Image: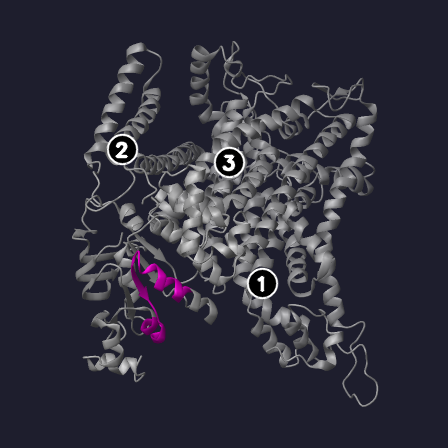
Amino acid sequence: MTLLAPEQDVTAGSLHTKRLPAWAALATAVVALALSAALVLGTGIGNWVLVVVLGAVLYLIGFWLAANAVEGPRSARNRTWSALIHSACVLAILPLASVTWTLISNGINRLDGNFFLTSMNNIGARDANGGAYHAIVGTLEQVGIAALITIPLGVLGAIYLVEYGRGKLSLAIRFFVDVMTGIPSIVAGLFVLAFWVLIVSPLFNNGQPQYSGFAAALALSVLMLPTIVRSTEEMLRLVPAPLREGAYALGVPKWKTILRIVIPTALPGIVTGIMLSIARAAGETAPVLLVAGGTAAINFNPFENNQSSLSLFVFSQATDSSRFSPDRAWTAALTLVALVLILTIAAKLLARRNRLTR
Amino acid sequence: MAKRVEATNVNAYYGSFKAIEDVNIVVEPKTVTALIGPSGCGKSTFLRSINRMHEVLPNARVEGTLTLDQENIYDKHVDVTAVRRLIGMVFQRPNPFPTMSIFDNVVAGLKLNGVNKKAVLQEAAEKSLRSANLWDEVKDRLDKPGAGLSGGQQQRLCIARTIAVEPQVVLMDEPCSALDPISTLAIEDLIFKLKDRFTIIIVTHNMQQAARVSDRTAFFSIERTGDPGRLIEYDDTQKIFSNPSVKKTEDYITGRFG
Amino acid sequence: MGDTPPRSVDASAGGPGAHSTRAAGAAASSDGPTDNNGRGGGSSLPRAKAFGAEPAFRGLTQASGIMVLVIIVAIAVFLISEAIPALRANQENFFTFNEWHAQSSDPRFGIAAIVFGTVLSAVIALVVAVPIALGIALFLSHYAHRRIATWLGFVIDLLAAVPSVVFGLWGRSVFIEPVRDFSVWLNHYFSWIPLFGGNGPFGNSILLGSLVLAIMVLPIVTSLSREVFMQTPKQNEEAALALGATKWEMVRTAVLPYGRPGVIAAVMLGLGRALGETIALAMTLGSSFIITANVIQNGGVTIASNIANGFGEADDIGRGALIASGLVLFTITLVVNMIARVIIYRRREFTDVAA
């Protein structure tokens, strides 16, 4: 009658299966570790790290064998995959913990007033002080200008896609917005280098290429635009149609409906998307490196002369040979991460309070 | 092939909410038992408790004893997957695996159980599809996706998939509620035919359907929203629909409540 | 809601289709671009203005949308125009030469080594990151307790927000130690495998760069895959369980096949990110223009890291040469991203049909 092989055919009285006892996992782990330690340390082929790694591998094999013998192949496979999936998480947590720990423990060394209030101007290789004031100014100005450029452009573009766009043009725009999110930041930097620094800026600067904070802002804009369009578009699509129709029925023109009804309804979500893209832009290094020029001095004017930025500061200090520069790099990195994460977390909290996405 | 299902003092919970309370019922082999009652009375919850699908939901649990031929399926040494293979289930909405062909859908359960011989699978697929009254309609397109069939065909495909692993009990959770009347009729014919081989328990909202297909009927109800569902009356279908012994059953059958 | 006044159907702003209700709504407004057919005679309704607020606003939004296309085209045009002089001056074959001596006198440069390094580091990064990312994604979607999943998912999202320069700094000054030890160990016992040969020094290698890259790609692949895994229809999961599948078998029959296109797209997006990553690699790789399978010796260079490292001392021809290499990177990532997007779009249609 039955198609299944005898050992797989569950008939009366065989609902009960032998289960691996709870202590089996622990016992396997202990045996695996001991075996691995004996093997590795006995032959001297490695240190405790190899003991742990080999122990984990032996554990998985041993556990699979035990489960296979007691509970059968299907259950063994199930348990082994579950163990693998859990170990993937442990594996990912390790570098994360290391980054967090080193960032904080190294970053606090220079977390002082001097760091935030001075620049690197006239700081030599033997000077322990010096700070990131100029870099912070640069980051804020560049990201601010980029935001001023991209927010209206991005939001209007998204409005076009959602409210007006039909046919091939909007399909093409949507597709290339998605594609544009994947453009490497260095390419955006090269583009602004080719377009603004080498071709346009000489027109205002007696024929000499002009590196500037504004050029960096342009490069950041290229990176921010697609993410803002995308997130705004998604939020606008969530605005219920009856809301629009209610306004139309009152004789409110479409553009007014969009500005007065649709945008305010979607605003929290739009702001979330904007904040996330600002956070991402603030951490970009490559485009700033190419077009802002970098400087050790404070320069408040984003349109003239070189500027630095926090991320560029981290890069330059990390590759500097002074023995004081690593501390400055770590503190700047900590500042940068704090800035980015505060923006990100604030954006996510705002998203949680968003009525449309709940 | 078919087995007796016996529930003793069964309670089922979603977190702290008690969905059914103190259900006692005996379902004889090779019969069709219909579970009827108003929405939220716990009949689907009880059905899902029978093959331990209830506990799949987060924080859901079952108390009491449920036996399959005297074997408690909630015993802690019982293998859940074995329970579910012996007690198959057909769901409210047809749910063929969208990425699989018709053939692969039917033999999905067999493959899980380690059957890999092509000839065996083919024979099993044909047998199950014939049993599910679907063979003639799909025999020429077994390699096409199962999601391309009509709703009624999809549901029969799901029944074929369920019976392909040769279960002893088949649970059906409102199998026709998403189907048109003609497909519903086809499924009802099928239930009648499958009765020879399986113990069938079916939840339905449709009282005519319960009257048409079942031998025995269990009526579930709740006092108020938030109260647990209870088994009010369990008897031969004919008796339930002609001369119920509980007033509440009569009210429900005659449409005065529910 | 759908009471479209027949009078304005043919003239409504958006035209017919799924949004006709909205367009019909606009028809009720007096200065919407609705009545331009002007139905002569008895109509007392004002005509739509050709130069009013509505067309102006519409034009403004359209222009903003078109900006995206303009920028994409402009990127290609300006990179090409700046690259051409350098490519003309180049004394070697741009595609097959593997060294980079790009200066005004006797410029000789080619992308063979840097493209090789770019692809190699990205592939190693993905080989390491994708299995782990899929494991975490499954953990978050199907294995973890709900509260842990929310918390861990949040942390993964934050990890994605950490700037690459921070990973570069960490890789360069912290992660390099264990990687160097590991490289020495590999070299000691496995030097007969070409990947792990060489006489050192070890540390600032493709291996270090790829592992840092893997950590950076991990959150992207994880969060995208988690999303598609979570979208698996509950009913299919239940169908598998009801057939007596174990949890892993349920994942294999219902979750993985359903999520496959989405996972492929996620991996492609991760690949795009890995190919274009600049600063982290500029800070960890040892920069050598040798094409070798050896992954543990100091060395390795990618298109992006070469631009970042070489830009400082580049003259006109040097800049042009770097821009030319950037154009190659742009093309590669554009192709990878377009493939990923096409997969996602196809999948969207597929799930729409299934729903």
Looking at the image, tell me whether mark 2 or mark 1 is earlier in sequence order.
2
Residue carrying label 2: A67
Residue carrying label 3: C216
Q: Which chain is indicated by disc 3?
A: C
Asked if residue B202 lies in the magenta stretch, the reply is yes
User: Which class describes the residues within 10 Å of circle 1: few (<14), some (14-19), or many (20+)?
Assistant: some
Q: In which quarter of the image is the N terminus of chain A?
A: top left
User: Which class describes the residues within 10 Å of circle 3: few (<14), some (14-19), or many (20+)?
Assistant: many
Which of the 4 quarters of the picture holds residue C88?
top right
Q: Callout 3: helix, strand or loop?
A: helix
Q: Callout 1: helix, strand or loop?
A: helix
Q: Which chain is indicated by disc 2?
A: A
Discs 2, 1 touching: Cβ within 8 Å = no
The part of the chain drawn in magenta is B187-212
> Residue C332: where, in percent of width, then height?
67, 35
Amino acid type at circle 3 is Met
Name the image colouring: one colour
Amino acid type at circle 1 is Arg
Asked if residue C277 lies in the magenta stretch, the reply is no
User: In the shown orientation, is residue A239 left or right of residue B53?
Assistant: right
> Residue B229: where, in percent of width, then height?
24, 70
Q: Which residue is drawn at 53% across and 14% down?
A: C194
As measured in the structure, the alpha-carbon distance from the residue carrying label 1 to the one carrying label 3 is 31 Å
User: In the shown orientation, is residue A190 left or right of residue B91?
Assistant: right
Residue A322 visible at all: no
Q: For the residues carrying marks 2 and 3, which lies nearer the camera in this image?
A: 2
- Residue C278 bears which disc, if any? none
Q: Which chain is indicated by disc 1?
A: A
